[in-house]
Image (cartoon, helix red, strand yellow):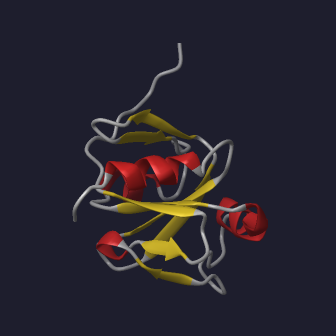
């Protein structure tokens, strides 16, 4: 997959103070998704992003081990999708229009922007 810096900048420009749904697929083919407002741009060159997940999250190990994931930047009209992926214990993808992205990760149709990501490092942060 080729990288286009202009597309990256344009996609990040859609995230002023928004909400993302970050999706991935595990090795068994199961889809996972979480709502994350803790999304930030770290660098344009090289292209780096940062997002956070609760250390007690059911899907933590899946995201830590993921070879790919998709950051779906939601639009103002997608509050219901944000709420769905912020919940626990239900099929989060039921009734949500998606298409297959990188590594099989779900791209939310109609999202303001979607970033296909091949993560480089998973780091544990410590708050002092």
- Residue found 63% across the figure and 85% down from its top: 94
Residue furthest to the left: 1
**Can you say which quadrant of the picture contains the N terminus?**
bottom left
Relative placement, left or right, of 103 versus 70 is left
Task: Say if residue 87 shows up in the picture.
Answer: no
- Residue found 33% across the figure and 48% down from its top: 5
Relative placement, left or right, of 64 versus 59 is left
Task: Say if residue 111 shows up in the picture.
Answer: yes
Relative placement, left or right, of 32 versus 65 is right
Residue furthest to the front: 6
Q: Position of residue 83 (x, y in %)?
A: 74, 63
Q: Is residue 110 above or below residue 16?
A: below
- Residue found 27% across the figure and 37% down from its top: 46
Foreground: 110 or 66? 110
Q: Position of residue 44 (x, y in %)?
A: 36, 37
Q: Is residue 103 above or below residue 73?
A: below
């Amino acid at each position: 997959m080729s990288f286009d810096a202009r597309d990256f900048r344009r996609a990040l420009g859609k995230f002023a103070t928004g909400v993302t749904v970050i999706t991935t697929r595990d090795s068994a083919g199961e889809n996972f998704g979480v709502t994350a407002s803790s999304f930030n741009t770290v660098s344009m060159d090289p292209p780096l992003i940062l997002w956070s997940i609760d250390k007690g999250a059911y899907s933590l190990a899946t995201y830590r081990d993921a070879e790919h994931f998709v950051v779906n930047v939601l639009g103002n009209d997608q509050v219901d999708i944000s709420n769905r992926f912020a919940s626990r214990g239900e099929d989060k993808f039921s009734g949500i229009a998606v298409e297959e992205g990188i590594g099989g990760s779900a791209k939310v149709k109609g999202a303001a922007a979607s970033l296909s990501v091949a993560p480089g490092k998973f780091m544990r942060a410590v708050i002092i």
